[in-house]
Image (cartoon, helix red, strand yellow):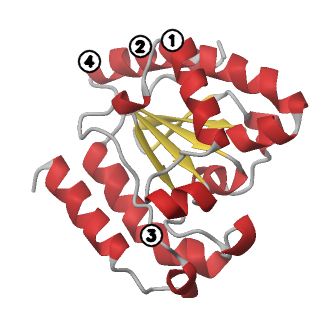
Amino acid sequence: MSTQAVLDAVAAEVHACARCPLHGGRARAVPGEGPANAELMFIGEGPGFHEDQQGRPFVGAAGQFLEELLGLIGLRREQVFITNVVKCRPPANRDPEPGELAACADYLERQIAALNPKVIITLGRFSMARFFPEAKISAIHGQARPVGGRLVVAMFHPAAALHQPKYREPLIEDFRKLPALIAQAGRAAAAGEAEPPAEQLSLF
């Protein structure tokens, strides 16, 4: 199957999904969106009110801020793939529960495998925990770490920066590092390296 075919298949399954109780309260599931050739993949936590209504990720205030952050590095949201660790809105925007994360895990795994992005950016601690389960986001945000042959960068969630201004500048600075990280990942791929050299990561 082509990358697009896999993404379409996952989206169709997500829209019909009843694996966990979240499906009972959703208006629309939110599988994620972006081009099949995206080099960057952003993984948030879960849909909010506006996302649930529209069936699209990051379309509320946090999504507007994400688009501003992308603009800082010369990118548009149409150039990146955006999804969440859970595909349906948790009630009152509460944190995703372990069973809900487990129910959606296969969808995310298939999206990652199909896209094979150069760099994955996790937004928030629940998406970070998918790759760095023991880490604290305050300690590793903005650092590029090799996982499974690609770079993963943990960042604060845009919503956190909107609600707590102390996270705004760190998030902006972390975004400014992305062009260099994308280039770094591209060089590693061109050289046939399974994982980028650890010493390169020390620059960040």
- Give the label, 4 or 3, closer to the camera: 3
- Badge 1 or badge 3: first in the primary sequence: 3
Residue under label 1: 180
Give the residue type at disc 2. Answer: Ala
Q: CA distance from mark 1 to mark 2?
A: 5 Å
Tell me if I can see residue 39 in this picture.
no
Estimate how packed mark 1 is, as few (under 14), some (14 to 19) or many (20 or more) residues with alpha carbons within 10 Å.
few
- Badge 2 or badge 3: first in the primary sequence: 3
Q: Any mark on residue 198, and which?
A: none
Residues marked 1 and 2 touching at CB (< 8 Å): yes
Q: CA distance from mark 2 to mark 3?
A: 36 Å
- Give the label, 2 or 3, closer to the camera: 3
The N terminus: image quadrant = bottom left
- Badge 1 or badge 4: first in the primary sequence: 1
Going 57% across and 71% down the picture, which residue do you hit?
101
Give the residue type at disc 3. Answer: Arg
Res 148 quadrant in image: top left
Q: CA distance from mark 4 to mark 2?
A: 10 Å
Check the image and report above or below for 185 versus 64: above
Residue under label 2: 183
Check the image and report above or below for 53 versus 132: below
Going 44% across and 19% down the picture, which residue do you hit?
75
- Give the label, 4 or 2, closer to the camera: 2
Left or right of 100 on screen, residue 120: left
Front position in the image: 127 or 16: 16
Check the image and report above or below for 161 versus 126: above
Residue under label 3: 28
Q: CA distance from mark 1 to mark 3?
A: 36 Å
Check the image and report above or below for 3 versus 196: below
Res 163 quadrant in image: top right
Residue under label 4: 190
